[in-house]
Image (spheres, grey):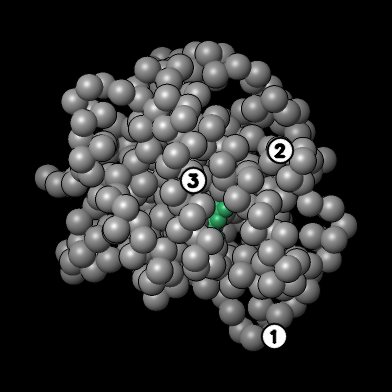
Amino acid sequence: MLDLMFSPEVAEARAAKKPLVALESTLVAHGMPWPENLEIARELEETVRMGGAVPATIAIVEGRPWIGLEDRTLAKLAHDGKQIAKAGATDLAVHLARKTTAATTVSATAVLAHKAGIRAFATGGIGGVHRGDTGDVSHDLIALARTPIAVISAGAKAILDLPRTAEMLETLGVLVLGYKTDELPAFYTRDSGIPVEHIVTTPADLAAIVRRHWDDFDGGGVLVANPIPADAELDPRRIEAAIHAALAEAEATGIHGKRLTPYLLARLAEVTSGASLRANRALALHNAEVGAALAVALGT
Ligand code: PSU
Ligand code: MN
């Protein structure tokens, strides 16, 4: 049987049946630079607490799947950053059997959070279909399709092919709900031009839909598409130009596979003098806020 480890804060929340929000650790270890990553990881947790829920940052530490991390463990993951393995859902068994440490991506975090009975999960932006014809499609999409959890995300990351990512979400049967938006957000910017059919405007409405999806239809993952706050949005043309440059560099340097997304995010932060990181922080905090509101509305 899978032996989950719970931090004291999460263990207490479970005993008291307080609402929990899962947070992932790849965004911290691989998606943002030290030391801002630790500050932001702590702010994400604090935002969930301010929203009336309890944060559960998830990672594998020496082979143990932790639901909720003590601050010193969070600090170590943030500090060690890209030296730590990046685990997708498929890699979990390897780390457990070999007692290794890994940051968990959206796919791995969703699976572990679901095992822990958590139904709301906030991230920055999910993975998706990469641009070009490399065939690189994030496992996040299939894991999300299979796992009954609501992932609050600022759309999919702008480094991706968003129209193809949206089509793939539909093919896989991931229910996409626009949170106060009728367009799929484009991570650093609010709009992608890709319409979202179902618009949700309150946590109660959101909770009612996801409950029906899971309880009545055995539905899988729900993507709650929550745009970056307007005052934190980047200029669409400038960020697109920066993405083009970063993608060209990645190709010239031969970066692909699991290293691609972290490489692109790091290059974007450099090219934009930190503007992309500030936007990433703002959108992730906003997702944590909505995650807490959903968890409270669900009462779990
Ligand atoms: N959101 C962010 N920053 C990130 C990620 C999400 O704001 O770094 C991470 C998530 O862990 C997601 C991963 O699962 O990027 C996608 O990686 P890949 O494209 O290699 O599947
Ligand atoms: Mn990939």
Residue at the right extreme, as displayed: 237
Mark 3 burial class by Cα count in 10 Å: few <14, some 14-19, many 20+: some
Res. 60 in view? yes
Mark 2 burial class by Cα count in 10 Å: few <14, some 14-19, many 20+: some
Q: Please, what secondary structure does the residue beneath circle 1 have?
A: helix
Q: Give residue 193's position: percent from left, percent from top.
A: 82, 40
Task: Indicate which disc, 3 or 1, sits on the residue closer to the N terminus.
Answer: 3
Three-letter code for the amino acid on which mark 1 is drawn: Ala
Three-letter code for the amino acid on which mark 3 is drawn: Glu
Q: Give residue 155's position: percent from left, percent from top.
A: 64, 43
Three-letter code for the amino acid on which mark 2 is drawn: Pro
Task: Indicate which disc, 3 or 2, sits on the residue closer to the N terminus.
Answer: 3
Residue placed under numbered mark 3 in the picture: 43
CA distance separating discs 1 and 2: 34 Å
Residue placed under numbered mark 1 in the picture: 252
Q: Give residue 231's position: percent from left, percent from top.
A: 77, 41
Residue placed under numbered mark 2 in the picture: 229
Left or right of 68: which side holds 82? right
Mark 1 burial class by Cα count in 10 Å: few <14, some 14-19, many 20+: few
